[in-house]
C-alpha cells in the first residue's frame, strides 16, 4: 500500500476526532501526526474529495465569522468510521528508512573528521530542541485534554517520540566520542 492510499486514513482519523475544514485538518496534522506522518496540501484536498465521493465523509459550507467567505466543513460518516476501523486492524506496512545523516556518516571517510563531527553536533542540537518540544506538548496535552478519550493514544505516540529522541541523543554522544577519539571504537 503506498503513502497516497494512506492519506485518506489520516484524514478519516482526524475527522473521527471532530468535523474540520481542510485547513483545520492541515493544522491538526502539523500539530500532531506530522512528527511521524505528514501529508501535503497536494495530498489532503484530493483525498478529501475522494472521501466524500466514497461516502466516507460529508461536506457542507459554513459561513465565516471573520470574512464573507465560506469554508467547507468535512464530517466523517458511519461508512467512513468503518473504513477507518478496517484499516486500523490491518497489518502495519513496513516503512523504508531514509536518513541523510547516516548516509553521510557511512561515507564519512571521504571528508575531514570535523565535518562529520559538525553534522552530528547539529543533529544533536535539533534532537534536543525536538525533545523539549515533545515534553512541552505532553504537558499541554495532559492539562488541556485530560478528559479526552483520545489522550492516552496521543500520549502513546508522543512517548514514542520522546523515547526515540532520548535514544538518538545517546547515540549522538557515543558517536561523538568515537569521532573525537580518532575513530577508535570500543
Image (cartoon, rainbow, N blue to C red):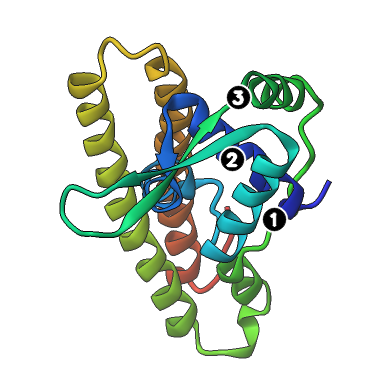
Picture quadrant of residue 54: top right
At a point 17% along the width and 47% down the height, the residue shown is: 65
Q: CA distance from mark 2 to mark 1?
A: 20 Å
| Label ID, residue 4 | none
Comparing labels 1 and 3, the label whose residue is closer to the camera: 3
> Between residues 31 and 166, which one lies in front from this camera angle?
31
Q: CA distance from mark 1 to mark 3?
A: 34 Å
Picture quadrant of residue 163: top left
Relative image position of residue 113 (x, y in whole percent):
49, 82
Relative image position of residue 84 (x, y in whole percent):
67, 26
Picture quadrant of residue 141: top left
| Label ID, residue 77 | 3
| Label ID, residue 10 | 2
> Between residues 2 and 85, which one lies in front from this camera angle?
85
Image: 128 above or below 98: above
Image: 20 above or below 145: below
- How many numbered marks have been drawn onto this rendered protein structure? 3
Neighbours of disc 1 within 10 Å: few (<14), some (14-19), many (20+) = few
Tell whether 14 sits left or right of 136.
right
Dot 1 lies on which element? loop
At a point 56% along the width and 47% down the height, the residue shown is: 37
Tell whether 7 sits left or right of 59.
right
Residue at which label 1 appears: 97
**N-terminal label among 2 and 1:** 2
Comparing labels 2 and 3, the label whose residue is closer to the camera: 3
Amino acid at each position: 500500500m503506498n503513502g497516497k492510499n494512506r492519506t485518506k486514513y489520516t484524514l478519516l482519523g482526524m475527522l473521527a476526532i471532530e468535523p474540520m475544514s481542510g485547513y483545520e485538518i492541515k493544522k491538526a496534522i502539523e500539530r500532531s501526526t506530522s512528527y511521524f506522518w505528514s501529508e501535503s496540501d497536494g495530498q489532503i484536498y484530493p483525498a478529501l474529495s475522494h472521501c466524500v465521493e466514497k461516502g466516507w465523509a460529508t461536506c457542507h459550507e459554513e459561513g465565516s465569522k471573520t470574512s464573507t467567505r465560506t469554508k467547507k466543513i468535512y464530517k466523517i460518516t458511519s461508512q467512513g468510521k468503518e473504513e477507518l476501523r478496517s484499516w486500523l486492524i490491518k497489518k502495519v506496512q513496513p516503512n523504508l528508512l531514509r536518513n541523510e545523516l547516516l548516509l553521510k556518516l557511512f561515507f564519512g571517510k571521504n571528508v575531514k573528521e570535523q565535518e562529520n563531527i559538525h553534522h552530528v553536533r547539529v543533529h544533536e542540537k535539533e534532537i534536543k530542541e525536538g525533545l523539549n518540544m515533545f515534553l512541552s506538548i505532553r504537558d499541554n496535552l495532559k492539562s488541556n485534554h485530560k478528559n479526552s478519550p483520545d489522550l492516552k493514544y496521543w500520549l502513546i505516540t508522543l512517548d514514542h517520540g520522546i523515547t526515540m529522541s532520548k535514544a538518538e541523543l545517546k547515540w549522538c554522544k557515543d558517536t561523538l566520542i568515537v569521532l573525537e577519539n580518532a575513530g577508535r571504537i570500543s
